[in-house]
Image (cartoon, rainbow, N blue to C red):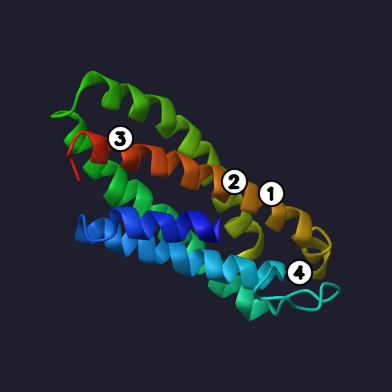
Amino acid sequence: MLTRQEQAKQRWGGAHQAIDNWLHERQSLLIEYFKLAGLPPYDSDSSALPPTEDIRQFCGLLVDYVSAGHFEIYDQIIANSSHAPKETEELANELFPLISETTEVALAFHDQYGESVDEAHLNDFDRHLSGLGEALELRMEFEDRLLHTLEQHQLL
């Protein structure tokens, strides 16, 4: 995921201020995800759960990232699609529902861990975090496909 993010920044960074901000939020989210999950290069004691405050901070970043996509970037994509070839609109229509599914996973994670974390929920934390990671990876793949298509049609 971090490699994909770095490639996205190199490819689309500087194309538009909103996209730059969004890619920055995406990178911050990924770094915090890797820290929570104890993944390289942020290895941690795999038997210990992250501090509750770290989980809450991550959930805040998660909602910011998901919101930026839905309320800034995707709106821009839709607006630009009216000037794009039909295949761009078709791709957006195909991917937006899939992206929405990943939003549901992200919001469910936030609802579970964003406000208050009780011990009963922490037993499933690693499983939920892993599921969220899979959803985020899919989401970023979908988002990158959209950005690639906009770039091909010189809409970025």
Instruction: Give how far apart the Cα atoms at labels 4 and 1 are.
Output: 19 Å
Question: Sequence-wise, which precedes: disc 4 or disc 1?
Answer: 4
Which mark identifies residue 36?
none
Q: Which numbered marker is on residue 118?
A: 4
- Disc with the residue nearer the chain's start (3 vs 1): 1
Q: Label 1 is placed on what type of residue?
A: Gly
Residue 100, relative to residue 132: is it above or below?
above
Mark 4 to mark 2 CA distance (whole Å) = 24 Å
For the point 34% across and 30% down, the residue is: 92
Tell me which numbered mark, 4 or 2, is placed earlier along the sequence: 4
- Point out residue 88 in the picture as x, y percentages from the top left corner: 28, 27
10 Å neighbourhood of mark 2: few (<14), some, or many (≥20)?
many
Residue labelled with disc 1: 131
Q: How busy is the neighbourhood of tag 4: few (under 14 within 10 Å), some, or many (20 plus)?
A: few
Placement of 85 over or under 6, stated as above or below: above
Residue beneath label 3, please?
A: 149
Residue annotated with mark 2: 135
Task: Give the spatial CA distance, label 4 vs label 3.
Answer: 43 Å
Counting residues from the start of the chain, the first of labels 3 and 2 encountered is 2
Q: Are marks 2 and 1 in contact (CB under 8 Å)?
A: yes
Quick check: can you spot residue 128? Answer: yes
State which quarter of the image contains the N terminus: bottom right
Residue 118: image location, x then y, percent: 76, 69
Apparent side of residue 56 relative to residue 24 in the rendered image (left or right): right
Mark 4 or mark 1: which is in front? 1
Q: Secondary structure at mark 2?
A: helix
